Amino acid sequence: MSQVWSERNKVVNALLPVADAFAGTKNSDVVNLANYKKCTFLIFTGATSTGTSVVTVNAGTSNSSATTAIAFKYRTQIAGTGGASGTTGSDIPSALTDATSTGFTTTASKEGATYIIEVDAATVAAAGTNYDHCKLTLTESDDHAVTGMVAAILSEPRYPQAVLQTAID
């Protein structure tokens, strides 16, 4: 029996889309990986000024303890200005890049940028005893607006079923 995409992947709206979404320090919802092997955070930016954010991933044992910064992999899709201008190359992904626990800085002034953050449950588990929760943290590095949103896609369920188990506590 073949499963459809939504039976293999769980989508979580991790940080709602709002103007100046990444002002100060913002944390996504904490995602519980106990029933999944992978979590992919997708950051989408809308209209931006010269604002940038430092992106990190934190792990822990629960919602309140996901504070240990971990290494992760990421790629970007920001070759053009994107958005309504439709600049050629804006949907071309970069090479998969290793980020340390200090994260990476987003690119300024890129409307329609996409950042793809890959988190492996094994990396989360290796960060500490009984660690199975993770979250994305965006820390604005200057005082300029960045409009955007974050979605989390959990994949490789440990116990596949037609209706996937919850991933947010």
Image (spheres, rainbow, N blue to C red):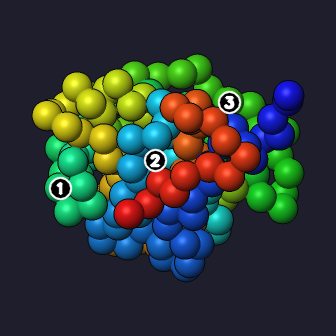
In the image, 9 versus 29, the foreground residue is 9
Which mark is first along the chain, 3 or 2? Answer: 3
Q: Which amino acid does label 3 sit on?
A: Pro
Kindly identify which numbered label has been placed on residue 65: 1
Q: Label 1 sits on what residue type?
A: Ser
Q: In this view, does 46 lie to the left or right of 29?
A: right
> Which element is circle 2 on?
loop
What is the quadrant of the C terminus in the image? bottom left
Pointer 2 local density, CA inside 10 Å: few below 14, some 14–19, many at least 20: many
Relative side of 87 to 67, left or right:
right
Residue 128, horizontal then vertical, whole percent = 15, 33
Question: With respect to residue 86, does 89 lie above or below?
Answer: above
Relative to residue 157, is residue 25 depicted above or below? below
- What secondary structure is found at the residue carrying circle 3? loop
| The quarter of the displayed image where residue 98 is located | top left
Task: For the residues labelled 3 and 1, say whether their Cβ atoms are less than 8 Å apart.
Answer: no
Q: Which of 162 and 145 is in front in this view?
A: 162
Of the 4 image quadrants, the one containing the N terminus is: top right
In terms of secondary structure, where does tag 1 sit? loop
Q: Can residue 94 be seen in this view?
A: yes
**Which residue in the protein does label 3 denote?**
93
Q: Image quarter for residue 120?
A: top left
- At which x and y percent is residue 19? 55, 79
Residue 106 - label: 2
- Disc 1 crowd rating (10 Å Cα; few below 14, some 14-19, many 20+) is some
Where does residue 83 sit, x and y in percent of width and height?
77, 58
Q: Earlier in the sequence, mark 3 or mark 1?
A: 1
Q: What residue type is labelled 2?
A: Thr
Depth check, front residue: 168 or 26:
168
Task: Say which of marks 2 and 1 sits in front.
Answer: 1
Camera-nearest label, 3 or 1: 1
> Residue drawn 48% across and 72% down?
21
